[in-house]
Amino acid sequence: MSDEAAQTAPVEAAPKEAAPSETGLVEGRSSVLARAAVIATAMVFGLTYSLTAPLIAFDLAARGLSEGVIGANAAMHAVGVLITAVVLPRLVATLGPRKLIFLSIAISATALIAFPLLPMLAAWFVLRLFLGMAAEALFVTSETWINALSTEGTRARSMAAYTAALSVGLALGPIILSLVGTVGALPYVVGAGIALLAALFVASPRITAPHFDEPTVGNPVRFVRLAPLALSATLLNAAIETAGLSFLALYAISLGWAEEHATRLMSVMMVGAIALQLPIGWLGDKMDRRHLVIALATLAAVGAAVWPLALSSTIATYALLFVWGGAFVGIYTIMITLVGSRFKGGDLVGIYAVSGLFWGLGALVGPLGAGFAMQAHPHGLAVFATLACAGFALAAWRLKGTP
């Protein structure tokens, strides 16, 4: 409560100052521009991942390379995340979020353009490494920055807007590929162009970014102990999201859905994830956030449990997945809101850096776990999602007072 009081005190004292009205207008415009820059950054992070993951896989497969080589190349993204997570708190403290975001976007755009220009396989491994490093920096610095721009009374809504932008970026990749195809340099150039447009927001001289101190202790284990539930939420989000991308359409097809209809299900889920974040964020600013997280996780578990019943009806499936997508992604939204309200400065950067590691771990174990579950049972994907969400709900209920 002392942090909240300190945070709100300057706002209450402001009307007593005799500052000119122009100052408030300038600060207001700067805040709006900064929020736009952070939202654009979140979209670039999502776009970079959702565009390159299938695009590079298609290109390597077209060369006749094996699944093992394709998987090894994809793993370089995770290696880049691991490398950056170790040094990121120090980089943010040294460069500041604005310069680091601008540098990361520039690296992402350059790497995307370099893929078609450098057809050597070894170069693609290096480029994929740089993409992972830049993506981790974008992920952590943008979340840290949006938290710094938020007051306690609007923090959940700010994080909801951020999460919605992240989901938009994840949805943009497949859309771009469906429009421009996967052959040639064009999809890489389009992705790089969108990234550079986002850089224009960050490069504006009217945007001021906060300074974050380097954590006194950089050991990742320390941050796991500080925020175990929040990091678990990141792992859960990555695991179920990547499992859904990999298997949801196949699951529906196995139950008799036509391929063209089954492939729309993930889009319906993503639309729900985008559209329902702002209402969930509003609730997060009006009620106890831990209770809301438990409610959302319980709703997600129950929703996944009834997938086998809903999939017998197209309308019921679309309605369920729309609501389920919003509730499930809302878990992550409210958890990062809780972290932002509890931690500040360098510790906040450190927790978010470690969350990148947990995201990579979730992206690894999610498809593996769901794949084994689907081999064991026809409704294995639903069982996997139900158990994962229910387990998190139970952990959120038992770990009271721990973010």
Image: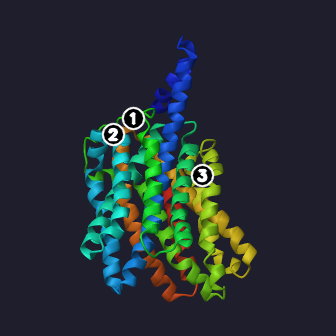
Report which residue position mark 1 lands on: 210
Is 334 situated left or right of 361 in this image? right
Q: Residue at x 64, y 76 (%)?
A: 307
Asked which colour scheme the image uses, the reply is rainbow
Q: Are marks 1 and 2 in contact (CB under 8 Å)?
A: yes
Amino acid type for the residue under numbered disc 3 = Leu
Residue 391 appears anywhere in the view? yes
* Distance from the alpha carbon under mark 1 to that under mark 3: 29 Å
Amino acid type for the residue under numbered disc 1 = Pro
Residue 400 appears anywhere in the view? no
Question: Who is closer to the viewer here, 6 or 30?
Answer: 30
Q: Where does residue 25 sit, x and y in percent of width and height?
A: 56, 25
Q: Earlier in the sequence, mark 1 or mark 3?
A: 1
Q: Where does residue 165 sit, x and y in percent of width and height?
A: 54, 53
Mark 1, other Cα within 10 Å: few <14 / some 14–19 / many ≥20: some
Question: What is the total number of numbered labels drawn onto the structure image?
Answer: 3
Identify the disc placed on residue 58.
none
Amino acid type for the residue under numbered disc 2 = Gly
Report which residue position mark 3 lands on: 292
Q: Nearer the viewer, mark 3 or mark 2?
A: 2
Q: Are marks 1 and 3 in contact (CB under 8 Å)?
A: no
Q: Residue at x 37, y 57 (%)?
A: 108
Q: Eyeballing the image, is 30 above or below 272?
A: above
Q: Nearer the viewer, mark 1 or mark 3?
A: 1
Question: Who is closer to the viewer here, 315 or 9?
Answer: 315
Q: Residue at x 51, y 48 (%)?
A: 39
Report which residue position mark 2 lands on: 96
Q: Secondary structure at mark 3?
A: helix
Q: Eyeballing the image, is 337 above or below 114?
A: above
Q: Earlier in the sequence, mark 3 or mark 2?
A: 2
Q: Are marks 3 and 2 in contact (CB under 8 Å)?
A: no
